[in-house]
Amino acid sequence: MTAPASPTLRWLTIALLLTGAVLSLLLPFVSATLFTIALGGVAIAAGVAQLIRLGGSDDTSGKVLRGLSGVLYLLGGLSLIVFPVQSTISLTLFIGFLVAFEGVTELAAAAARPIPARTLVLLDGIVTAVLGGLLIAGWPGDSAWVIGTLLAAGMVMSAINLFTAGSEPQTAA
């Protein structure tokens, strides 16, 4: 994330991120449901884009696969929007498996060969795998707060990043 050039805009962005984080922590179910609905909107847009791209394929198999992909995106997006509470519960289980899998892959990477900061990678893998396992074990009861809390953590980290970025000169990559 690059910091806005204007200090006023940077501080406004930090304030908005922290406000969003606090609201997400105070109302985790609401923020998780809104996130799920927004994710549904993104999936619908992706489905429409896939269907629009049907004309770009010359071969029939490409058109069939792209059409199938577009329809699946549309159905998944509509499902997220029409059933946001149930979708949030399912999304929490998916996140639990994803986090557990990430932890296991970190452990496997650390065990496979010597790498820099191996102890930290092992610790990261253990903590991540345990957190994923806890999400899976606590499902569906934890579904009401997990996604909202993760969103809040992400917003706080973005705000800290902007705060620490300060007014450092930005270099072109």
Image (tube, rainbow, N blue to C red):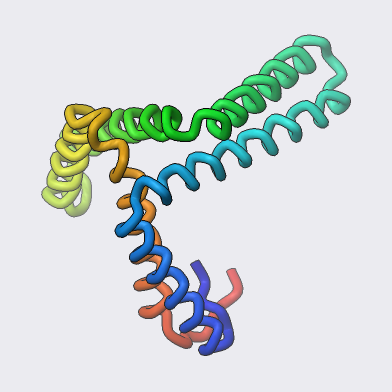
User: Going by the image, does 107 lie left or right of 60?
Assistant: left
Across the whole image, how many numbered discs are drawn on residues? 0
Identify the residue at image location x=87%, y=19%.
58
Quadrant where the C terminus lies? bottom right
Identify the residue at image location x=49%, y=66%.
1
Identify the residue at image location x=85%, y=27%.
56
Q: Nearer the viewer, residue 29 or 116?
A: 29
Residue 10 to residue 120: above or below: below
* Any part of residue 62 in sight: yes
**Percent position of residue 42, x then y:** 62, 41
**Percent position of residue 63, x then y:** 79, 17
Residue 40 to residue 16: above or below: above
Q: Which of 95 and 100 is in front in this view?
A: 95
Which quarter of the picture shows residue 55?
A: top right
User: Going by the image, does 113 lie left or right of 75?
Assistant: left
User: Going by the image, does 29 lie left or right of 34?
Assistant: left
Q: Which of 89 and 168 is in front in this view?
A: 89
Which quarter of the picture shows residue 20?
A: bottom left
* Any part of residue 109 in sight: no
Residue 112 to residue 16: above or below: above
Q: Which of 61 and 19 is in front in this view?
A: 19
**Percent position of residue 93, x then y:** 32, 29
Which quarter of the picture shows residue 48?
A: top right
